[in-house]
Image (cartoon, grey):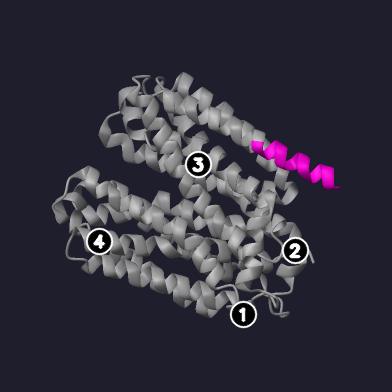
Amino acid sequence: MNSTTALSQTTDSKQLSPRGLSLAILALALGGFAIGTTEFAMMGLLPNVAAGVHVTEPEAGHLISAYALGVVIGAPAFAVLGARMPRKLLVLVLMSFLTIANISSFFAPEYWSLMITRFLSGLPHGAYFGVAAVIAASLVPPTKRGRAISMVMLGLSLANVVGVPLATFLGQQAGWRTLFLVVGGIGALTVAGIALFVPHVKADPGASIGSELVALKRVQTWLTLLVGVVGFGGFFAVYTYISPTMTSLAGFSSSFIPVIVGLYGLGMVAGNVVGGRLADRSVMGTIYWVMGGVAVVLVLFGAFVHVQWAALVLTFLVGAVGSMLIPSLQTRLLDVSPGAPSLASSLNHSALNVANALGAFLGGAVLNLGLGYTAPAMVGAVLAALGLGVALYSGSLDRRKS
């Protein structure tokens, strides 16, 4: 049984109306909006958080690392442990967990308790996106899976445009803990929306912890994850240092940085939408072209970031081209992991968080060598080229089997 057939058999036979489908996807995307807001708004509020719990900013940065660690651990753990649960029930549990963890962060009295609640907040992140993507793919014909998955992921992209700036503003005005109440409220709305609008989606009849773990034995699963880790690391090598790059090289004032970050977010929204449509045409073709496109755009970014108008255009393009990769990677993982879609799809977000750490580390390493703020973009271009190489090798294995 291939993954497409398996997915189609897990959804109740009653077809959703176009309005019902839109509401179901919207409810799932709202969860992505909550997750994106809690993940990224912490970065803008880091000085406030540090002062609030009486630690240095680098120590407060460990709270972001704790969240990322929760994502890496929680994605496979929840996906495997919830293998036999109906998928609608599983996403309800995951979003309820996220909501409670964020409200717990609001009440955390000091640094170490906040560290624990931030780790807990990260646990459902990857599994939620993974299972939500499986649900979305099961609600539409096979030819529209990429588009449906991209609509779920759109919530994460929109969080960078709307949720993060709003939560940051509210946190600055009403106290940084307000962030966690905002996310808790969005999480509660998501739980209600999923309960009302997402149809019952059964677990696979043969699903079990063992059947999900079979995905880890497949070479193509690991190659696809490696494409995400290496290729998407280039995106994060630039994104991590976008603020000092724009102030030091492009000459923008620090007060203009929110506009630049918002432009990056708009690029992510556009890329996510376009990437979903491209994935429906050709999954591997999209991965090939996008990886090559990321490498080219990052080289151009490094070459022309000192020109203000070019820096703005290229900032949008880096966000757009990088985000085009996500729907195709998610769809590819469903294709190469029949019988274990939840685990494979969830691991994509573990891979992207490893990419975040890898890109930030390598970008920081070349900066510490004194190579300047264009160097992270060059590192990113190399990573994208390596990701393309891995993708080409993965595609060659497919052709040998056919």
Q: Residues within 10 Å of mark 4 (few under 14, many from 20)?
A: many
Residue matched to label 3: 267
Residue 279 x/y as whole percent: 69, 49
Q: Judge left or right: residue 27 versus residue 104.
A: right
Q: CA distance from mark 3 to mark 1?
A: 34 Å
Q: Residues within 10 Å of mark 1 (few under 14, many from 20)?
A: some
| Span of residues in magenta | 390-402
| Tag 1 secondary structure | loop
**Magenta stretch: helix, strand or loop mostly:** helix
Q: CA distance from mark 2 to mark 4?
A: 42 Å
Residue matched to label 1: 200
Q: Residue at x 65, y 59 (%)?
A: 215
Q: Are marks 2 and 1 in contact (CB under 8 Å)?
A: no
Depicted 39 relative to depicted 232: above or below: below
Q: Give whichever of discs 3 and 4 has the lower sequence position.
A: 4
Query: Which kind of residue does numbered mark 3 sit on?
Result: Gly
Q: Are marks 1 and 4 in contact (CB under 8 Å)?
A: no
Q: Give whichever of discs 2 and 4 has the lower sequence position.
A: 2
Q: Give whichever of discs 1 and 4 has the lower sequence position.
A: 4
Residue 120 x/y as whole percent: 36, 65
Query: Which kind of residue does numbered mark 1 sit on?
Result: His
